[in-house]
Amino acid sequence: AQSVSQHNHHVILSEAASLELGCNYSYGGTVNLFWYVQYPGQHLQLLLKYFSGDPLVKGIKGFEAEFIKSKFSFNLRKPSVQWSDTAEYFCAVNNAGNMLTFGGGTRLMVKP
Amino acid sequence: SAVISQKPSRDICQRGTSLTIQCQVDSQVTMMFWYRQQPGQSLTLIATANQGSEATYESGFVIDKFPISRPNLTFSTLTVSNMSPEDSSIYLCSVEGGFSKTPYEQYFGPGTRLTVT
């Protein structure tokens, strides 16, 4: 069975700091990769996705993620975080079927 | 994207009772799913709600405990039966296909926060 690991459970940054959240998965075949975000009091939203093509994908709000197949990784990055980025971030993997497997989530707090 | 709503948004229930959660989408979708998010944990897929047939359950989840209906392409229900405090979680509906032309891309409802006392 596939699994998804997010290395950081809690991250605290100051505004304007750079962000990188790690995500590794275990499945060896073709995968579709997602990052979801859940802002306080809001529902889960799709931040960005990778299916094929350019391994560097750009999402909403200045986020990007890079798929490195050899490392089974799909890390999320943002050059300069804002207070409004405070949220919980979930990495998810789908192995070309319908089942979406989620990582444990990373709670990001951005201090103003 | 489509609007996905869930009812109730939250509830407090006594152990031994059952609660039915509704998920409504404002456009037809191919796939509907039910997830559970236990306190402080990530999302776990309970089952895929199949239109016109029995739901497909993931390991650890059974129909007697979590009966699911999907009478059409815009609506599904999840019942949490004979509840215990361990069932206290957020239950989320998600959808795929239909309004989203991209396969495997799921969109989530706002969730139902259930507390069992």
Image: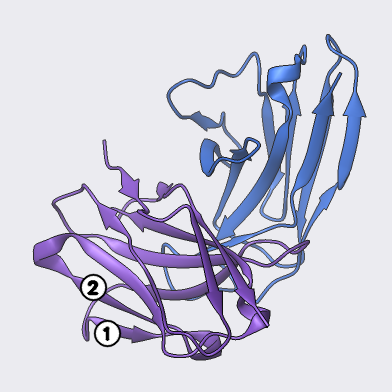
Label 1 and label 2 in one chain: yes
Q: Which quadrant is the C terminus of chain B positioned in?
A: top right
Element assignment for label 1? strand
Q: Are marks 1 and 2 in contact (CB under 8 Å)?
A: yes
- The image quarter in which residue A94 lies: bottom left
- The amino acid type, in three-letter code, at marker 1 is Leu
Give the answer, above or below, for where A2 lies relative to A109.
above
The residue that appears at 66% across and 37% down in the rendered structure is B39
How is the rendered protein coloured? Answer: by chain
| Residue drawn at 53 percent across, 74 percent down | A13
Image location of residue B21, percent across then percent down: 80, 37
**Location of mark 2 (residue):** A67
N-terminal of the pair, mark 1 or mark 2, is 1
Chain B, which colour?
Answer: blue
Q: Nearer the viewer, residue B112 or B74?
A: B112
Q: Is residue A44 left or right of residue A50?
A: right
Which residue is denoted by mark 1 in the rendering? Answer: A56
Image position of B27 with respect to B87: above or below? below
In this view, the residue in front, B86 or A29, is B86
Relative placement, left or right, of B24 versus A47 is right
What residue is drawn where x is 33% and y is 49%? A5
Q: Is residue B34 visible?
A: yes
What quarter of the picture does the N terminus of chain B occupy?
bottom right
Q: Position of residue B107 (x, y in %)?
A: 59, 63
Chain in purple colour:
A
